[in-house]
Amino acid sequence: MRLPDKIETKRLVIYPLQDSHTQDIYNNFNEEINTFITPAPPKKLSDTEEFVSGAIKKNREGKDFHVVFFIRTGEFIGGGSLAHIDTSTPEFGVWVKKSAHGNKYGREAMTALKLWADQSIEYKYLKYPVAIQNIASRKIPESLGGVIEDKYKRPRALGGEIDGVEYRIYPK
């Protein structure tokens, strides 16, 4: 499967992850936005380089679709993925830099990825795991018709546990 070179929305341009995005991710994926996310923020640039390299490889192999998104002026906003696109139950992930919170950019980006999935892959449902208390992020799968099908506890890389729910979003 060939991933698109870009996906455009009303306000965003979404690109498959590339090496050139490493510094933006390193600068913005930090403890401040990591409250409800399982992976730990990188301690050094080489941690981000390793993640980006692995994600690009998974994109090339057709296993995942890791993306970054920018507003049309060129400002970096965040990243996300539709992981396991080679299975019947791919999984969403998204994060938005702190200064861009509250603008519904994550929702716009994930809506675009859902549309791409509907047109490009066959799936039973899309998973959207999210911390129960992360109300802003929970609005994303809800806006896509997602329904809660599971609950979980997951260790958080920065300590403690995440009480989460898994939304399932079915094809149109």
Image (tube, rainbow, N blue to C red):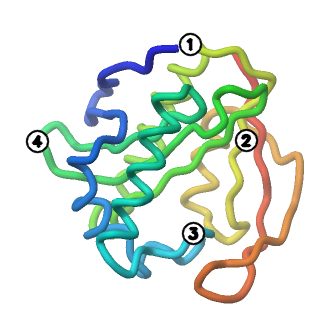
Among the 4 quarters of the image, the one containing residue 17: top left
The amino acid on which the numbered mark 4 sits, given as a three-letter code, is: Thr
Which element is circle 3 on?
loop
The amino acid on which the numbered mark 1 sits, given as a three-letter code, is: Ser
Q: Which residue is mark 2?
A: 127
Q: Nearer the viewer, residue 136 or 158?
A: 158
Label 2 with label 4: CB-CB less than 8 Å: no
Q: Which residue is mark 4?
A: 73
Q: Earlier in the sequence, mark 3 or mark 1?
A: 3
Q: Earlier in the sequence, mark 2 or mark 3?
A: 3
Horizontal side, residue 114 vs residue 161: left or right: left
Q: Earlier in the sequence, mark 4 or mark 1?
A: 4
Q: Nearer the viewer, mark 4 or mark 1?
A: 1
Among the 4 quarters of the image, the one containing residue 8: top left
The amino acid on which the numbered mark 2 sits, given as a three-letter code, is: Lys
Q: The C terminus is located in which quarter? A: top right
Label 4 with label 1: CB-CB less than 8 Å: no
Horizontal side, residue 51 vs residue 76: left or right: right
Q: CA distance from mark 2 to mark 4?
A: 31 Å
Question: Can residue 104 be seen in this snapshot?
Answer: no
Q: Residue at x 26, y 33 (%)?
A: 13
Q: Earlier in the sequence, mark 3 or mark 4?
A: 3
Q: CA distance from mark 2 to mark 3?
A: 17 Å
Give me the disc on residue 120: 1
Which element is circle 2 on?
strand
Q: CA distance from mark 4 to mark 1?
A: 28 Å
- Residue 91 in the image: above or below residue 39: above
Q: Which residue is mark 3?
A: 39
